[in-house]
Amino acid sequence: MRYLFLSDLHLEAERPDITRAFLRCLDERAPACAAVYILGDFFEAWLGDDDPNPLGDQVAAALARLADTGVEIYFMHGNRDFLLGKGFCNKARATLLPDPSRVTLNGEPVLLMHGDSLCVDDVAYMKMRRWLRNPVSVAVLNALPLSTRHRIGRKLRSESQTRTRMKASDITDVNQQAVEAVMRRHGVRTLIHGHTHRPAVHELQIEGKAAQRIVLGDWDRQGWVLEVDQDGYRLESFELNGNGT
Ligand code: LP5
């Protein structure tokens, strides 16, 4: 079985090159896979399934076409698209996964996360996250008029940009103790996540055994995918305008 993982595409109308690269990736890589996992921040900003969004419709249709061929599509929320709900998932024929989710890949238990909840040293972000991701807040936000959601989204984005620039680099990365704790709690020796935009394969020890944390990259100057099959885990980058394979 082969599986494809991606995250942090930050799809937006202003970056048609990323959308094209994603659609090419679906055509060229995904048909050979049993499942495609999108681990959050698929969209630059998702303000609700009721927000008219031609780009969202375009990628949902492409995912649904893939699902029709028997490839399973899984979606996990990121900090940019946690308001994405059943409306989009039904159009894309995708299943929404909770964060974290434990899955079995080729017989091995593997933990999937977006990754932002591991950045526990970023105290201001964690506080904001706790508030925003509370189910009551999500319901309240979804009930706000669309124009208000757009205004709040713009304000959050500009505050976040200003404040993130002032944060030390290690503050915006995952905390090693948090990583080890979540891996121990879920009984896994492989963790796959995105969010930090620091693609890498980190080796570590969990309860005296070799383990790995695979960080997916963001799609900006290049695209990133992780392919998993019986031969192992391959984290690869490719040119956005080039051949996706
Ligand atoms: O996104 P990224 O990776 O650049 O930065 C994140 C953290 N920032 C965020 C905020 C998003 O970027 C904003 C996206 C908005 C669009 C979609 C959301 C829809 C929201 C609902 C609207 C109805 O997640 C950033 C982390 C960084 O990752 C690294 O982990 O540091 O966190 C921050 O910068 C948070 C600040 O530290 C605290 C911000 C307090 C903001 C207070 C403004 C309140 C405005 C309210 C207006 C009514």
Image: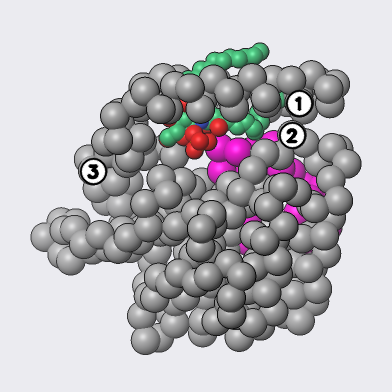
Q: In what quadrant does ligand 1 lie?
A: top right
Quarter of the view holding residue 72: bottom right
Q: How far is the residue under mark 2 from the one under mark 1?
A: 7 Å
User: Which of the labelled discs sits on residue 244, or is there none?
Assistant: none
Disc 2 to disc 1: CB gap under 8 Å: yes
Instruction: State whether label 1 is within 8 Å of ligand 1.
Output: yes
- The residue wearing badge 1 is 150
- The residue wearing badge 2 is 47
Crowdedness of circle 2 by 10 Å Cα count: few (<14), some, many (20+)?
A: many
Q: Which of the marked residues, 2 or 1, is nearer the chain's N terminus?
A: 2
Residue 232 vertical position relative to residue 171 in the rendered view, above or below: below
The mark lying in front, picked from 1 and 3, is 1
Crowdedness of circle 1 by 10 Å Cα count: few (<14), some, many (20+)?
A: some
The residue at the point 36 percent across, 23 percent down is: 166
Q: Which of the marked residues, 1 or 3, is nearer the chain's N terminus?
A: 1
Amino acid carrying mark 2 in the image: Leu
Magenta residues span 71-92
Crowdedness of circle 3 by 10 Å Cα count: few (<14), some, many (20+)?
A: few
Q: Is residue 27 visible to us here?
A: yes
In percent of width and height, residue 51 lies at 84, 37
The residue at the point 25 percent across, 59 percent down is: 202
User: Which of the labelled discs sits on residue 176, or is there none?
Assistant: 3
Viewer-side residue, 14 vs 75: 14
In percent of width and height, residue 47 lies at 74, 34
The residue at the point 51 percent across, 84 percent down is: 1
Amino acid carrying mark 3 in the image: Gln
Instruction: State whether label 3 is within 8 Å of ligand 1.
Output: no
Disc 2 to disc 3: CB gap under 8 Å: no
Quarter of the view holding residue 124: top left
Q: How far is the residue under mark 1 from the one under mark 3?
A: 35 Å
Instruction: State whether label 2 is within 8 Å of ligand 1.
Output: yes
